[in-house]
Image: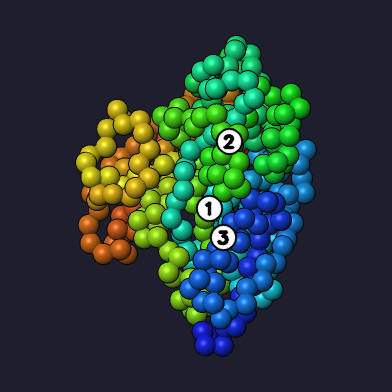
């Protein structure tokens, strides 16, 4: 994999999935780059991934790791694309050799959105109501909060999922708040699930840009898009997931915030302002039926350079993962990874 001198980089090819949300994300990055480098020609390479093709099976049953990124990564290897734009929550914890996440963008809303045509909140749902989601993370936390609800698998892009809700197949569905906001469907959001009720997925609300590790000039080109404070938070979350050997389709939740004071369990609002030097990480692992929901957290004070803070964030993720493992997370996850053993 060779690098191209920045002065000779006249064209940049972006690999992206073809869903409306994925295209919005790729176009958003394209537009930001064009503001910085108006002389560039930027093309979108639209790719259909395995996760986009298999719509009748829960993601966890077809192997959740890399379902929405492998084909995009192959385009990087083949030289068809220079960068790939991802929802960070879809990116596996272990990247293929030679590839790197060159950019962690500023994080948008990390929450899960409650979407319904009849009810204003999860608390208003009647007993036995049907809730749609494709996420085991959402399922285990919703079932822990409301054991009486029925969880029904919901796959497809945002439009497809909303169509199934409108057809009456579900009383409510749960989607990422940021995704609905990005494609200007805010009006469908009846409310956001409280962080304490449904801790977000690792990296939810953040975009990441993947590229070849040795393509130093592309990395230089992308550098202005990086958000250092978001990067610290997201490194902590991904370190937790990596230590648990998790992917994006397992019942693992993690959410880190930067704040000025020591975090307490009484905190219920999410802080997306990236203020302060205290890094607080919460993690959860649950059984899909909600019968067990393990919780762990830790807060540290960050010191030193950006690189040193990132190393501290990584260790924080490992520490919180170890707490979860000590409480029995390994057995829960093993039953999901190896259901027949």
Mark 2 vs mark 3, CA separation in Å: 21 Å
Residue at 50 percent across and 45 percent down: it is 204
Q: Position of residue 50 (x, y in %)?
A: 73, 52
Dividing the picture into quadrants, the one containing residue 267 is: top left
Circle nearer the viewer, 2 or 3:
2
- Is 42 placed above or below 315 here? below
The mark that comes first in sequence, 2 or 1, is 1
Name the disc covering residue 293, or none.
none
- Is 55 placed above or below 5 here? above
Q: Nearer the viewer, residue 84 or 96?
A: 84
Residue 306 horizontal side relative to residue 217, left or right? left
Q: Is residue 136 visible?
A: no
Residue on which the image places disc 2: 187
Q: Residues within 10 Å of mark 2 (few under 14, many from 20)?
A: few
Mark 3 vs mark 1, CA separation in Å: 15 Å
Residue on which the image places disc 3: 28
The mark that comes first in sequence, 2 or 3, is 3
Circle nearer the viewer, 3 or 1:
3
Residue on which the image places disc 1: 88
Residue at 52 percent across and 55 percent down: it is 207
Q: Do callouts 3 and 1 mark residues in contact (Cβ within 8 Å)?
A: no
The mark that comes first in sequence, 3 or 1, is 3
Q: Residues within 10 Å of mark 1 (few under 14, many from 20)?
A: many
Q: Do callouts 2 and 3 mark residues in contact (Cβ within 8 Å)?
A: no
Q: Residues within 10 Å of mark 3 (few under 14, many from 20)?
A: some
């Amino acid at each position: 994999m060779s690098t191209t001198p920045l002065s000779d980089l006249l064209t940049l090819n972006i690999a992206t999935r073809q869903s409306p949300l994925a295209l919005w994300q790729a176009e958003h990055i394209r537009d930001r780059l064009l503001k910085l480098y108006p002389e560039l020609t930027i093309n979108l390479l639209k790719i259909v991934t395995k996760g986009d093709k298999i719509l009748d099976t829960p993601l966890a049953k077809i192997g959740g790791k890399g379902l929405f990124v492998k084909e995009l990564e192959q385009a990087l290897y083949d030289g068809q694309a220079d960068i790939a734009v991802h929802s960070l929550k879809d990116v596996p914890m272990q990247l293929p050799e030679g590839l790197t996440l060159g950019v962690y963008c500023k994080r948008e809303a990390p929450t899960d959105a409650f979407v319904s045509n009849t009810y204003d909140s999860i608390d208003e749902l009647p007993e036995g109501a049907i809730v749609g989601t494709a996420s085991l993370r959402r399922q285990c936390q919703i079932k822990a909060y409301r054991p009486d609800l029925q969880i029904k698998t919901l796959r497809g892009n945002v439009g497809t999922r909303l169509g199934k809700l409108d057809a009456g197949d579900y009383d409510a569905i749960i989607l990422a708040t940021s995704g609905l906001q990005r494609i200007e469907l805010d009006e469908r959001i009846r409310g956001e699930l409280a962080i304490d009720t449904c801790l977000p997925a690792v990296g939810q609300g953040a975009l990441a840009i993947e590229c070849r590790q040795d393509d130093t000039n592309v990395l230089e080109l992308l550098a202005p898009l990086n958000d250092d404070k978001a990067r610290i938070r997201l490194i902590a979350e991904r370190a937790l997931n990596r230590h648990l050997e998790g992917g994006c389709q397992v019942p693992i939740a993690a959410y880190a915030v930067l704040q000025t004071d020591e975090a307490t369990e009484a905190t219920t609002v999410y802080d997306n302002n990236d203020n302060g030097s205290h890094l607080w990480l919460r993690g959860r692992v649950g059984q899909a039926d909600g019968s067990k929901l393990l919780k762990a957290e830790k807060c540290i004070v960050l010191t030193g350079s950006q690189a040193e803070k990132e190393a501290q964030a990584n260790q924080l993720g490992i520490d919180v993962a170890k707490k979860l493992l000590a409480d029995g997370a390994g057995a829960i996850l093993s039953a999901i990874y190896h259901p027949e053993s």
